[in-house]
Structures are given as C-alpha cells and as structure tokens.
Image (cartoon, rainbow, N blue to C red):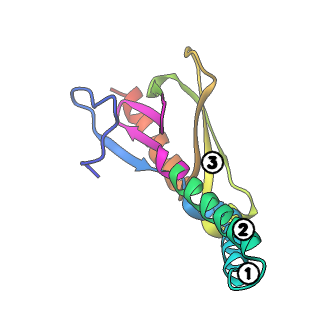
Amino acid sequence: MSAIIPRTGLKEGEKILWFGRPRLLAFLGRLILSSMLIFFGMLLLPSPWIPVGAILLTIGVIIIAYTVVKVRAHAYYITNMRVLEEYTLISRTIKETTLDKITDIVLHQGAFGRLLNYGTLHIHTAGTGFPGIDFRHVKDPVVVRGTLINAKDAYQTK
C-alpha cells in the first residue's frame, strides 16, 4: 500500500490509512450484458449474419474495456490529514479536503451493494469550493467509513 501515493504527493508526516478504487463487481450488470453481447456475437460469426455478429462482439468488448478503464481511472485515499478523490484519464480531476472540514459522512448501500459488499460514501464538507467527495462503489464501505471517522477523530484531537 505504501507504493500507492496520491499524484499530489504526501505532506510531511502524512500517512496513507486507506486506499481504494471502485469495485468492479459494482458494474456486474454491465459486465453480464457485455458478456452476452460477446457470446451472441461469436455465435453469429460463422453464419450469414457475420456483420451483426461482428457489431455485437465489438460493442461487448468496448463496454468491458470502458468499464475497466473507468474503474482504474478513479482512486480514493484517506490519510491521517486529508481525504482525496482522484480521476485521471485524459484529463485529471483531484478533490481533496482536510479532515477537519468534513461535516457528514453518508453511507449508501443498495440491495446489490449489500450482497456484493460495496457501497458509496458521500463525504460532505464545509468551507470548500465543492459540495463534497464521493467514494463510489468501494469495497467494505462500513470499514472505510470507520477508518475515516477514526482518522477524523485523531486529527481533531491533535
């Protein structure tokens, strides 16, 4: 975990307490659909329906590639001083706030999220130019929330 650091770098005395990315299982429906498109596309290839099969196959591969790239483009960090959300694909977006500016932490976990153990944390902030930070589709959201609350408490008692 220590080899994974935010693109903005770490400040003096800062340590990464948690690092995560969106969980690929959160996109299970999209992955099943694209797998079905690939399957039916391959079934149609050795037939007179070659163009339709090629199109289905291509669409399925594009959906899977897009999903994997989108998951890998997001990175979430909790350190002993701040919280960061990074999105880096072609452009780069970095949201960060110090732990003392966090006002609320809202955990959202739907039915599939409960079954597959993923959820979204909405981290509301005060005194920043954005409404908050979202850790979308993270694994073990209850554990992540606990890590964030403990880090916030430790930061405020310094």
Q: How far apart are marks 2 and 3 (CA)?
A: 32 Å
Looking at the rendered structure, the secondary structure element under dot 3 is: strand
Task: Decide: is 7 above or below 38.
Answer: above
Q: What residue type is labelled 1?
A: Leu
First of labels 2, 3 by sequence position: 2
Q: Does residue 72 belong to the magenta stretch?
A: yes
The quadrant holding residue 43 is bottom right
Measuring from the top left, give residue 112's x and y in whole percent. Answer: 71, 65
Q: Which amino acid does label 2 sit on?
A: Leu
Q: Nearer the viewer, mark 1 or mark 3?
A: 1
- Specify the segment rendered in magenta: 70-93
Q: Which mark is residue 84?
A: none
Identify the residue under disc 1.
44
Q: How far apart are marks 1 and 3 (CA)?
A: 39 Å
Q: What residue type is labelled 3?
A: Thr
Q: Which residue is drawn at 78% across and 77% down?
A: 49
Between residue 50 and residue 150, name the one nearer to us.
50
Q: How far apart are marks 1 and 2 (CA)?
A: 9 Å
Task: Decide: is 56 above or below 140.
Answer: below
CB atoms of marks 1 and 2 within 8 Å? yes
Identify the residue under disc 3.
120
Task: Decide: is 117 above or below 76.
Answer: below
Q: Which of marks 2 and 3 is in front?
A: 2
Q: Which residue is drawn at 63% across and 54% down?
A: 119
Question: Which residue is farthest left?
Answer: 12
Measuring from the top left, give residue 17's x and y in whole percent. Answer: 35, 45
Measuring from the top left, give residue 62's x and y in whole percent. Answer: 61, 58
Identify the residue under disc 2.
56
Between residue 123 and residue 43, name the one nearer to us.
43
Q: Does residue 103 belong to the magenta stretch?
A: no
